[in-house]
Image (cartoon, rainbow, N blue to C red):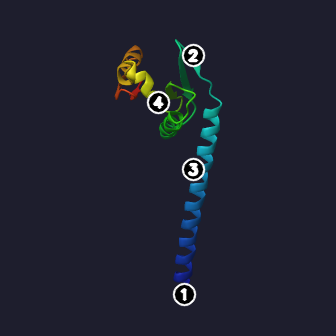
Amino acid sequence: KTPAESLLAKVKGLIEENKALQKGLQEAKRGQLKQQLQELKPENLGGVSLLIASLPISQDELKEAAELLALDNRFQAFLITTTEGQISPLILRINEQLVSKGLHAAELLKKVAAIVEGSAGGRPNLAQGVM
């Protein structure tokens, strides 16, 4: 091989290795996030299993946390935010049972956000906002 071909092959190899390392890092972070979420305990508020938590994770990880918590049957509702960054996003999710009883996540989160001079919107079962 010519030196240019060798260099190109080496660069391609490094790029593939980097991709594999990035994937491994993402999987490790997801595993750590799952473990962190498993340690959270619901509160009982008027017969509703509720989680309210401020998590030391990035905004992207907060969205992933919401997806994971939505699959966790321990919580009928959860309100989560992050302690990272200058803007504090809020995610409120309520299960279909609570929606059928007349609760509306977007309306509830708008009230919470108004208290902290933030804003919110969304659907009956899932709302997002910022404070």
Q: Local crowd at mark 2 within 10 Å, few (<14), some, or many (≥20)?
A: few
Whether pointer 2 and pointer 3 mark residues with C-beta atoms closer than 8 Å, the reply is no
**Number of the front mark, 1 or 2:** 2
The answer to whether 49 is drawn above or below residue 64 in the figure is: above
Q: Nearer the viewer, residue 126 or 8?
A: 126
- Snapshot quadrant of residue 120: top left
Q: Local crowd at mark 4 within 10 Å, few (<14), some, or many (≥20)?
A: few
Residue 68 horizontal side relative to residue 116, left or right: right
Q: Which residue is mark 3?
A: 26
C-alpha separation, residue under disc 1 versus residue under disc 2: 70 Å
Residue type marked 2 = Asn
Quadrant placement of the C terminus: top left
Q: Which residue is mark 2?
A: 44
The answer to whether 48 is drawn above or below residue 30 in the figure is: above
C-alpha separation, residue under disc 4 versus residue under disc 2: 31 Å
Q: Which residue is mark 4?
A: 86
> Could you say where residue 7 lies in the image, as x and y percent from the top left?
55, 77
